[in-house]
Structure formats: C-alpha cells, structure tokens
Image (tube, rainbow, N blue to C red):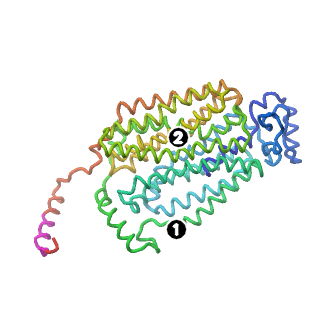
Amino acid sequence: MMRNDINFAMVAMVRSSGALESINVETNATEHSMLKNNGIPWYNNSLQHHFTNESGASSSKPDSLSKSGALYDWSPAVRSVILSSFYWCYVLSQVVGGIATQYFGTKKVFGWSQFATALCSVCIPVGADIHYTVVIILRSVQGFASGLTWPAMYAIVGFWIPLAERSRFMSSFQGFSIGIGLTYPLCGFIINEFGWRYVFYTTGSLGMLWCILWYYLAFNTPKEHPRISTKEFEYIEFTVSAEAKEALGMKVPWKSILTSLPVWAVAITTFGRIWIHYIFIVCGPNFMKNILKFNYQANGVLSGMPFICSYASSVLFCYVADKIILNHWLGITNVRKLFTALSQVIPGILIYWIGYIDTNIGLLLVVWFVAVALITASYAGAMAMIVDMAPNLAGPVLAFCQTIHMSASFLSPLVSGLIITNESSIEQWRSVFGVSSAIAILSYGFFQIYGTAEVQIWNFPPPRTDSSAEESQILKRKDEDAMPKHLL
C-alpha cells in the first residue's frame, strides 16, 4: 500500500498537462496564488470534463479538488522522476538487506524498514508543499527501506516453513497484488471524500499499526517464539533442519552465478515482465483519468480490481503447473517456459492492442484485466525456475536477478514520463504501450533460448579432497567404531 499509494494520489495532486496547455501563464499563477492563500480550488472550464459523469451532469464532488489542499504544476518529467525514485534505492538495497538480515535477523530488519517507510508516507504531504525534491528524497528513503524486505522475507522461510509447504507459503508473497487491489479503491474514496493528503496519512498510519503487530507476533526462529506449542516446534525443527544443514556454510560462487546464461535468462525475461507490470501499476490510474475520463472512485476500483484477480490467478497458475509436472505431461523446463510465455508474450500483445481500442471502454477493460491476470503466471515460470536450477543458492540467485529485473520498476515510469508530454494524447500513450510490448516480447526470446530448469553444477559445494577432510573422515570412523551398536 505504501509503495503504490502515490501512483493514484498523483492524479489528484498535479494538474493535467493536457489542461494546462489551454491556460496562459498569468492566469495559472493567479489561480495558484488564490489556492495557496485562500484555499480556493483551482478550476477552469477546460477541466470541467474531469468533474462530470458520462451523462454530462456535474458531479456533486468535483474529484476532491475542493478538499485537496493544493495542486502542483509538476511537469510529466518531474512526475515520472517522483514515481520512479522509489525504485532507484530499492534496487541498490537488495544486497544490503541480505547482509543486514544475517547480522540482525528478519524481525528487526523487516520491522524497522516498514516503520521507516510508514513514517515517510506520513511526511509526503508536507514535503510536497515544500518542494518536489523533498518528495523524491522521501520516496527514495522508502525505496531503500522496502528493498531490505525481500531478502529478509526469504531468510525467514528457511527457519519456519517445511519444504513440503513452501510452494503454498510462497503465494503469501503475492500479498502485494492484494495491497494494490485494495489501495486504489481506498485512495479513490479518500480523495473524493477528504482529499489526497489523507491518502498518505491513512497508509502511513496503517503501516505503523502493522509494525506494532509485527513486533508482538513475529520471531526470527521457532526457538525464539514464546507461545509456540511443543508439537509445532518439533515438527518444524525436524522438517527444516536436514535441508538447512546441507547448504550450511556453503560459499556462494558469485563468479559462476554472474556468468551463468540460465541465470541471465531469468533476469532478462523478468525485466520485461516487470516493465509491463509497472506500466499497469504506475501509469494505469493516469491513463484511466486522462484517456478514459473516469472519476476518482471509478478509477480506483477499476485500477485495483485487476490486481485482486491477479492474486487468484497466481494461485491457479501454480496449482496447474504443479499438476502438469506431477503427471509428467511436460518436462519442468517446458512448463516454466510455457508459463513465462503466458506472463509476457500474451500481455505484451494485449497492451499494444489497448492503445487502439480506447473508444470501446468495455472491451478495453476486459483486455486490461486479462493482461494483468496473466502477468502472474511468471511465478509458475521464470521465478520458480530460480529454485529449480539452484535450490541451495536460491537466495543469492534471487538477489542478483532482483537487482537486474527491478531496475525496470523505475525505468518503466521514467521512460513513460519522457514519452508522454500531453497526458490526454492517445497517440503518445500508444507509443508507451508499443515500447512496453516490444520489451516484454523480446526479453522472453532470450529466456526461450537459454532458460533451463536443470540443476546447475555450481549449485553444489565443491568436493573436499584436502588432508584435513581425510583426517576428519578417519576420526569419524574411529568414533563410529567406538560407539555402542544400538546407537548406530
């Protein structure tokens, strides 16, 4: 919620570039002064279409402009920088998160990172009044803090979740889809009733409340939990200990990972998926406002619902993929490629088509929903392949792939902001959709060639043949000979 609240709030914070073209500078400055000093909303007849419903009747609440408190003359380029600033430091903090978790544990790293993110959310309205650079700084801090969370989440899985239950548990990481699906309708309601400032106050407050619950409910290991039952503790310890010992102390072969074509195949194809996904996440509300002319509440519901559907579809895709593998209908590599193609090639085609069906709103929304729902098929495809090819090194491989593919999360809105100078121009939106389509489809091509689910040779620790290892084996045999037979 705290990551994506600004994507929707921005449409209420900033004046439309299309509307600004019809207003001279003097009038604009005068109205801005009136707004700042007297709280009178900036309004012009050229913007009236934003405040009317499809029948042409005036809305009783003009999209919350009377309650917004301020409207900013930020250019599309500035807006794209603000929206993408979260992901600059998010990408850079992945490795930091892994190191910090190793020293301080998931509870502290995850909890404090979320608290920092929540505090920045509460401060964004004040920062926006000061200057947009303050918002960029706050979003960058949020991005760095949030980047610590993924390594922290993966670290705690090994201690708590038995191998037989991990596929089901990993679907909980798709909670971000639920967060987006709930955030956009909530933002639409808040903006319409109270103004955009309360979007950040609400998400920030919820984030801080979550931190309190996390502090009392979350623990790094079952051994640290004060309320765990003996039966559950023994079950978890028995089922996770054997696997943990196999990779314990294994040195990460970074050179092999960095030079592995299958690893790069996952990183590159996922870059294309993230690119197209963030067009829907970040640019979607803006498209629905300026092209489809939805009011804030309708915009919120229609922007958020596809992501609720995508969570359900991710569970379905993982279930179907497991069934195909268990019944040997396809090999694991072919299953991963099939679902990766579903998550990129088809959405890539659909997003290109969206730019040319803007006059048929019903069909456009159906295509929009289908494209977003299909994107999550990657969790049965390329994302699952990380564990297939490197089960002992899934964390380091994920960290590397995440560093590569999450760069698309800030490049995607940044490039879109450079292309779109007039947000009411469908031609410019078509260019954005066309670029996204090409990236999604072409990046999959590399995966089709080099992607494989076969376990890589560097996944296993190198055999030890030194004298100390031989000595250890001799001592071990002596201990076994001396041990009573009933204990062997």
In the rendered view, tell whether residue 264 sits above or below residue 165: above
Q: Amino acid at mark 2?
A: Ala
Say if 45 sits above or below 254 in the image.
Answer: above
Residue 333 is marked as none
Left or right of residue 336: residue 213: right
Pointer 1: residues within 10 angstroms few (<14), some, or many (20+)? few
Q: Residues in magenta?
A: 474-485
What residue did someone put label 2 on? 373
- Quickly name the residue at label 1: 217
Q: Where is residue 283 drawn, in percent x and y?
A: 63, 37
Indicate the position of residue 167 as horizontal and vertical percent values.
Answer: 40, 52
- Residue nearer the viewer, 139 or 134: 139
First in residue order: circle 1 vs circle 2: 1
Q: CA distance from mark 1 to mark 2?
A: 32 Å
* Front-lying residue, 479 or 450: 450
The type of residue carrying mark 1 is Leu
Residue at image point 70% right, 33% down:
292
The image position of residue 110, as x and y in percent, is: 52, 59
Q: Residue at x 47, y 29 (%)?
A: 441
Determine whether, in the image, residue 333 is placed left or right of residue 25: left
- Quadrant of the rendering where the C terminus is positioned: bottom left
Numbered marks: total: 2
Q: Is residue 475 magenta?
A: yes
Name the residue nearer the viewer: 3 or 88. Answer: 3
Q: Looking at the image, is 249 positioned above or below residue 380? A: below
Q: Quadrant of residue 289?
A: top right
Residue at coordinates 37% horizontally, 40% vertically from top-left? 258
